Amino acid sequence: MASKSTDKKIEKEAKEICLKTLSLLGFDLTPKITKEEGAIHIDIEGEDLGLLIGQHGSNLESLQLLIGIAINKKVSSGKWIPVLIDVGGWRKQREEAIKALVERAAEKVSMGDSKAELPPMSPAQRRVAHIFVSEQKGYVSESVGVGEDRRVVIRKENG
């Protein structure tokens, strides 16, 4: 477990990297950085954040990957530190929407359908769906399809 001073140092470095990246992209935004449960959480609030989020969160996922690499190259001592970025609460809202999709799909399956398919999602969003399905008793999920058409399919556990 990292010490508080180490966490503060990591948060400081993460904020500097994030500020510089946002500035290079033409955004004048101040991120809020916290380190909890072994991950760095970056929350970015402001106006006109659509470009930063991108279609279906694609820009946000790319930004998270690049900033995560930069932070880990700067502060990591061999162990990868996950970096999670949320812009304008978009990621949290998307997780809630995915949870609602999973609940509706599970209900369809419980009413007699052999399976229910969710719409195509990014790998990160499919992971969220699989986690929510695993929390539902009696259901299993798998990803099917290729590329941008990859989606989650939900079935009864023994069906």
Image: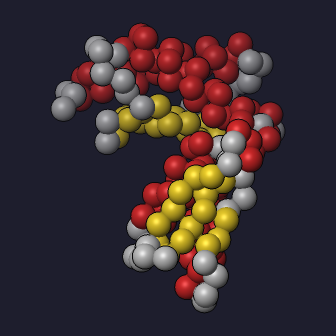
Up/down of 31 relative to 113, above or below: above
Q: Is residue 44 visible?
A: yes
Give whichever of 69, 110 is nearer the camera: 110
Image side of residue 91 versus residue 138, left or right: right
Give whichever of 77, 24 is nearer the camera: 77
Give whichever of 95, 16 is nearer the camera: 95
Residue that protrudes farthest toward the top in the picture = 74
Horizontal and vertical percent position of residue 90? 66, 49
Horizontal and vertical percent position of residue 146? 69, 42
Based on the displayed image, in which of its 4 quarters is residue 62 positioned? Answer: top right
Which quadrant is home to the N terminus? top left
Q: Residue at x 63, y 34 (%)?
A: 61
Based on the displayed image, in which of its 4 quarters is residue 122 positioned? Answer: top right
Up/down of 156 relative to 12, above or below: below
Q: Residue at x 72, y 58 (%)?
A: 119
Q: What colouring does the structure picture have?
A: secondary structure
Up/down of 149 relative to 153, above or below: above
Q: How many numbered circles does the render carry?
A: 0
Horizontal and vertical percent position of residue 132? 48, 63
Q: Residue at x 58, y 29 (%)?
A: 64
Based on the displayed image, in which of its 4 quarters is residue 29 positioned? Answer: top right
Up/down of 13 relative to 112, above or below: above
Image side of residue 95 versus residue 137, left or right: right
Q: Is residue 15 visible?
A: no
Horizontal and vertical percent position of residue 100? 62, 70
